[in-house]
Amino acid sequence: MRGRTPTKASSPAAASLQGAAGSVMMYILLMMGLITVITLGVMRFIAADLSAGIRQLQAVRVFNIAEAGIHYALGRLQQPGAAGYRGETVTVAAGGTLLGSAVVTVYCLDGQPPPCSGATAAFRRIVSVATLAVPGPRRTLVVTVEGFPEGVSPYVICAYTSVTVNQGITIYGDVAADGSISLLGPASSPARV
């Protein structure tokens, strides 16, 4: 018996056990792969949803900035000497944080810069091009307004529908509306026109 090395006996039970272990290992690897694919799919869905939400928020913000530029120009057109107002760059911030800016340009109805003349001298076309402080969408709003030369319009408020003035508010001037004019408040603090 010298010089012989013992050999392992392969029995059918041992071969069946090794085959079962290999099957379990393949099943585990398959399940891990399936879980990985599902996890990556969910993560991509979440990332796409988040990206769409950010784009939607930016679209709303840039629209609001463009609208703020229009309102700013309307306010400037209400001031004395507004006949020559041609626009400017308006920065929009919230609580000290810069949100974006609107480049506001005012034209006469015929496309010429103010002051306007002729039959359409009271009309202005206001163009507001808004951008965000961060890279994102741009928005352009164009409105055409008709104004009154100083001292021509007798109304401080002129509404297409109704006007409601809350308690404690006093308006110094005439108010006109195509609907009702409501003055709210108790006798101790009424609204006044």
Image: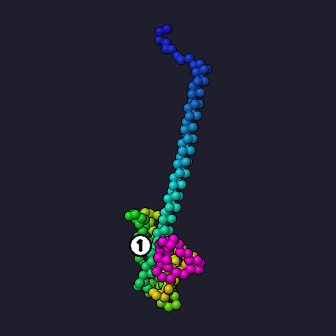
Q: Is residue 187 above or below residue 108?
A: above
Q: Is residue 34 left or right of residue 5?
A: right
Report the span colored magenta: 166-193
Q: Residue at x 55, y 51 (%)?
A: 45
- Callout 1 secondary element: strand
The answer, for residue 168, to whether it is visible in the render is yes
Q: Which residue is mark 1?
A: 90
The amino acid type of the residue labelled 1 equals: Val
Q: Is residue 7 above or below residue 97?
A: above
Give x and y (percent) for residue 173. Answer: 48, 82
Q: Residue at x 43, y 79 (%)?
A: 76
Q: Is residue 142 above or below residue 149?
A: above
Pick whichever, 103 or 92, lies toward us.
92
Residue furthest front as drawn: 187
Q: Residue at x 45, y 84 (%)?
A: 113
Determine the main secondary structure of the stretch shown in magenta.
loop
Give x and y (percent) for residue 11. Answer: 59, 18
Q: Is residue 118 magenta?
A: no
Pick whichever, 126 or 146, lies toward us.
146
